[in-house]
Image: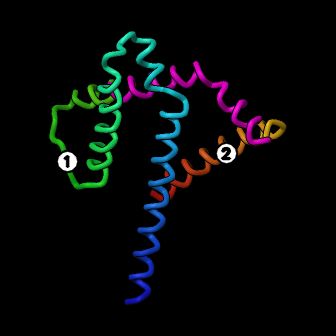
């Protein structure tokens, strides 16, 4: 009985910690790298900046809820292409904005005193992503 409660508490703690880490990373990515203001600047839609911000927050909340719930959508087969198109636009815009401001990593590394370890920092990020992806594919 106590071990089941302990296991459930540990799983809840790990899930919450992972969610906070991923969420804060995404927020840091969007805020520190000025993704949304740069997107507004490129598209010349300065009056819609609050709409972009609301869309990112609403999309994150909605798809998190859908992912964690047992909701099933029974849509026509071509609807997958519609969702794929929107997901592709989102990822493409993030990637385009990131390529314009990619010099953030070297600047950050120099400011925290890790300028000489830049290659190791990048390799740690790459191998961490690969290891996490392999772990998720194999065990989930």
Question: Which quadrant holds residue 40?
Answer: top left
What scheme was used to colour the molecule?
rainbow
Q: Residue furthest right?
A: 116
Element assignment for label 1: loop
Mark positioned earlier in the residue sequence (2 or 1): 1
User: Which of the labelled discs sits on residue 5, or is there none?
Assistant: none
| Residue 114 is inside the magenta segment | no
User: In whole angstroms, how far apart are the C-alphas of marks 2 and 1?
Assistant: 34 Å
The residue pinned by badge 2 equals 127
Vertically, is 45 above or below 20? above
Where does the C terminus fall, quadrant-wise? bottom left
Of residues 89 and 13, which is closer to you in this image? 13
The residue at 48%/26% (across/down) is 35
Position of residue 129 measured from the top left corner of the image (x, y, whole percent): 59, 45
Q: Quadrant of residue 116?
A: top right
Residue drawn 37% across the image and 89% down it: 1
**Viewer-proximal residue among 78 and 68:** 68
Residue under label 1, please give it.
72
Q: Which span is picked out in magenta?
A: 86-113
């Amino acid at each position: 009985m106590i071990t089941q409660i302990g296991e459930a508490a540990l799983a809840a703690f790990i899930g919450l910690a992972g969610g906070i880490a991923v969420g804060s990373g995404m927020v840091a990515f969007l805020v520190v790298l000025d993704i949304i203001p740069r997107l507004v600047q490129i598209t010349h839609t300065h009056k819609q900046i609050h709409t972009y911000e609301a869309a990112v927050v609403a999309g994150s909340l909605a798809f998190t809820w859908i992912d964690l719930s047992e909701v099933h959508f029974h849509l026509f087969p071509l609807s997958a292409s519609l969702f794929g198109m929107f997901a592709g636009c989102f990822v493409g815009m993030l990637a385009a904005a990131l390529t314009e401001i990619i010099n953030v990593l070297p600047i950050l590394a120099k400011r925290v005193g890790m300028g000489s370890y830049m290659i190791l920092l990048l390799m740690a990020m790459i191998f961490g992503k690969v290891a996490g992806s392999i772990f998720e594919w194999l065990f989930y």
